[in-house]
Amino acid sequence: MDKKNFEKPEYYVNRELSWLKFDDRVLSETRDKNLPLFERLKFLSITSSNLDEFYMVRVASLKDQVHADYEKKDIAGMTPKEQLKEISSQTHELVNVQYNTLNRSLLPALEKAGFHLMARHEDLNQEQQEYVDRYFEDNVYPVLTPMAMDSSRPFPLIRNKTLNIGALISKRDKKKGKESTVFATVQVPSVLPRVIQIPSVKENDTTVILLEEVIEKNIGELFLGYDVVCAHPYRIMRNADLTIDEDGAEDLLVEIQKQLKKRQWGEVIRMEVEEKTDERLLDILKTEFEIKDEDIFYINGPLDLTMLMKVYGVEGYEEYKAKKHVPAPVPAFQNDKDIFQVIREGDVFLHHPYMSFDPVVNFVRQAAKDPDVLAIKQTLYRVSGNSPIIAALAQAAENGKQVSVLVELKARFDEENNIVWAKMLEKAGCHVIYGLVGLKTHSKITLVVRREETGIRRYVHLATGNYNDSTAKLYTDCGIFTCDERYGEDATAVFNMLSGYSEPKSWNRLVVAPIWMKDRFLKLINREAEMAQKGIPAFIVAKMNSLCDRKIIAALYRASACGVQIYLLVRGICCLKVGVPGVSENIHVRSIVGDFLEHSRIFYFHNGGNEEIFMGSADWMPRNLDRRVEIVFPVEDEEIKKEIKHILDVEFKDNVKAHILQPDGTYEKMNRRGKAKVNSQMIFCQEAEDKAKAVKKQKTDHGRVFIPAEPAEDIE
């Protein structure tokens, strides 16, 4: 078969439009009345946060392409201009659904639950008004900086993503006998809480008002001597896509710090305004921000719904929230053994957030203290705000160990955080590598080198997710600990490649991008196609965050046409179409959107019964396969293979959180009529708890031999 047949644009979906479908799937959770009310609020907040990042990066990039007269078509045959037009149309529809859901479903449900979100200060009663005015005077007024625009004062610089209130203020000119109107603006300060609790009418109810409403009610206090003609909130999104000339940047650290400042003042690419904003005020904003009508969103409700996460955090209302999941202990470490002894006894599998992330933190902590550990090497992409891993690495360096850390400065929106950590680690005496020119290092690997009686032994942790103890409670990820020498040799080669220019001639086990990972995946897919052509049963099961690499998709189409059964679990972007006659009839795609963010990458190839399973950090996207340092590793332990196959099996049986891709490009939830509910994430929570309890019970059953007898109870 001619491979080019499978690369026709009509067989592909545009990447950005596919992402919007993902955000719509998240939004569908907000509309699901089977979910606890406050969980629905949380999902609505997430859709808003997602959309912000999408505009600042993806839409910004397309606008840059249009400005540069770049007209190359994407894999679906769309030019940047065509993409922007369709994105604008679909995003406006998405935002309408967001606010319809908030106003028609969520706010009335909150009212019933005794939680009142006062969307308009005009609706406050006398007691509430007095409270709000006092709060403004005591807490808000001293922080505000009102700025007016006139002949001597230009339009102020408005920072990216900030919420502001624009006003028209007028004053009568006694000499000329006429009124002059000027524009003024005030930033809603992010240092103050946006959600403010105020007195309720009913005793046990909760009533809150938003900070911008408190300011708007008292805005006259900021412009004494003027009449406030109108006041409306607005919010802008700027181009935050960092463009760094790495070859020309002598110091990547300094260059990124410079670019981060520019992010606040990039081109305005989206503006949110209140639905009934005064036309005169709107005209000033349009002119000053040089923004087109299609990039303006008229909002019927509060701007920036990420504030709903603050509402979610309000104390009480536990019956309207999902039960908090506490990660279970990892069975292999439920003992008094040293962590290195456990790993020597056999590879250990971790499945987060169902299992605790503690062993990963303890691995670095124990290595830092262990006198026999000579070196620790680790890649860091995103870490938490108060990372115990960073603290342990710093401690290890202070203890005289060789500590090498690759801190990826180009991790989007974590650049600032990573710069702080990098400097701290350097001060502690660690060797810090600031990524590689032209490549992001996205791999997740830790290497501990230890001196033992038998000689030097290398312990390796490999994972699908970041070394972030906070997101490890929210993201589903897999990892393994091993001291298999083949992995140890490869791990050493990876770090030598990152810190110097030493690229090994061959690798034992690890599959590394951008060197030859894509080729390896293409060979594995084509091998299944050849099996199918020979009449041998052929299967591919793959789980990832995104799928948009043209060559990989074309290979999957060819394999499907040859008769390979392909099951894909793709959380986010999927540029592949299903059900295309002669092309993708044997491809089945689903997306799981649940309480935890599906983040693990797992690749299973049947290989005529000699199964091969890989896990790792890479999605099937051009950026992962061609422009990043990624690691995918084979799973060799038979027990761990069984566990991973079980994970895939349960996820493909999920009929609660799974959305199935249809031939028309839409996603639909499964019809559960007559079927038992299968919620894969909840099943894994329960299984992890049961395994931990079983180990605990076993320890109790085989506990002390000499147990004192309890005193006999009195016989009545």
Image (spheres, rainbow, N blue to C red):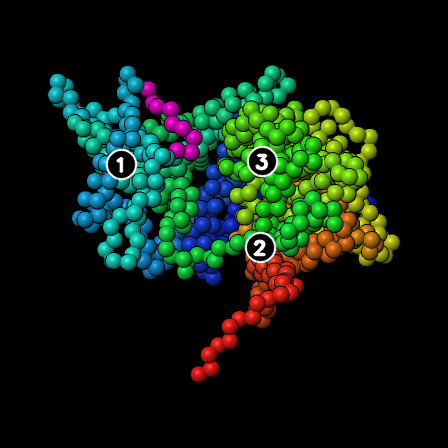
Left of 660 or right of it: where is 210? left
Residue 88 as seen in the image, left or right of residue 167: right
- Image disc number at residue 139: 1
Q: Are marks 3 and 2 in contact (CB under 8 Å)?
A: no
Measured Cα–Cα span from mark 1 to mark 3: 40 Å
* Left or right: 714, with 447 as reference point: left
Give the quadrant of residue 305: top left
Give me the disc on residue 328.
Answer: 2
SS class of the residue under badge 2? loop
Which picture quadrant has residue 502? top right
In the picture of the structure, the residue carrying the numbered disc 3 is 392
Residue range highlighted in magenta: 154-162
Indicate yes or no whether the magenta region holds residue 160: yes
Q: Is residue 77 visible?
A: no
Work out whether residue 19 or residue 423 is closer to the camera in this orientation and state it: 423
Mark 1 burial class by Cα count in 10 Å: few <14, some 14-19, many 20+ = few
- Farthest right residue in view: 534
Label located before the other in sequence (2 or 1)? 1
Looking at the rendered structure, the kind of residue marked 2 is Ala
The reply to whether dot 1 and dot 3 touch (C-beta < 8 Å) is: no
- Residue at (56%, 22%) from the top-left corner? 253
Q: Which mark sits nearer the N-terminus, 3 or 2?
A: 2
